[in-house]
Amino acid sequence: MISSREGAGYIRRRRVCPSCGQRFTTHEYLAQPTLFVVKKDGRREPFDREKVLRGMQLACTKRPVATAAIEQAVAMVEAALVARAEAEVPSALVGELVLAELARLDSVAYVRFASVYRQFPDLAALQAEIGALTRELPTPTAGALTVDGQRVPTAS
């Protein structure tokens, strides 16, 4: 093993294969009880960290946001959900937590995600959201997530 470091909710290990010399990295996460997301139509599906990651990466495409920052934002969302100590969470909460993290990372990524997530009915609604964003850019302290002005507890 070359190195082992703790990240936001995971351990990153770098290793070298003894036979071929190839280096590789693993990210190890603590196994959590299965968290279910309740969709708008009532369906329940297991929380999928990779799905949240893909959505945030897509919103941040061609933006100056580091991959590590996106990974940390996903970890913050997941930690906030786990900290609720509930077996099921509404999909709306997941979406709002993602929006809060994207607003902190990059305002353009926030608008991209919001335009799909909130399904604005027309251009005026989208313009109103952009106007609200420019007036109220969130400045939460590191590690503090807020949804609708309320602080969401995160795992310490």
Image (cartoon, helix red, strand yellow):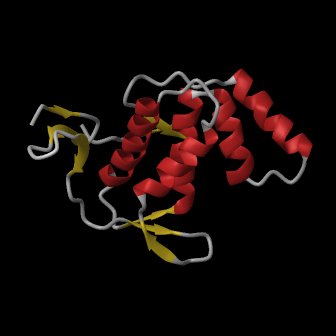
Q: Look at 36% across and 42% down and name the residue there.
A: 75
Q: Which corner quadrant holds the C terminus?
A: top left
**Picture coordinates of residue 55, whole percent (x, y):** 57, 49
Residue farthest to the front?
A: 20
Q: Residue at x 14, y 44 (%)?
A: 17
Residue 53 visible? The answer is yes
The residue lying at 38 percent from left, 49 percent from top is: 78
Residue 56 position in % (x across, y down):
55, 44
Q: Is residue 123 left or right of residue 117?
A: right
Q: Is residue 51 above or below residue 87?
A: above
Name above or below for residue 144 compared with residue 28. Answer: above
x, y (%) of residue 138? Answer: 57, 25
Q: Residue 54: x percent and y percent?
A: 52, 50
Is 108 on the left-hand or right-hand side of 120?
Answer: left
Q: Quadrant of the N terminus?
A: top left
> In the figure, is residue 46 to the left or right of 5?
right
Is any part of residue 150 visible from this angle?
no
Q: Quadrant of residue 3?
A: top left
> With respect to residue 47, does 20 lie above or below?
above
Please give the count of numbered marks on the rendered protein. 0
**What residue sits 83% from the left and 36% below the top?**
128
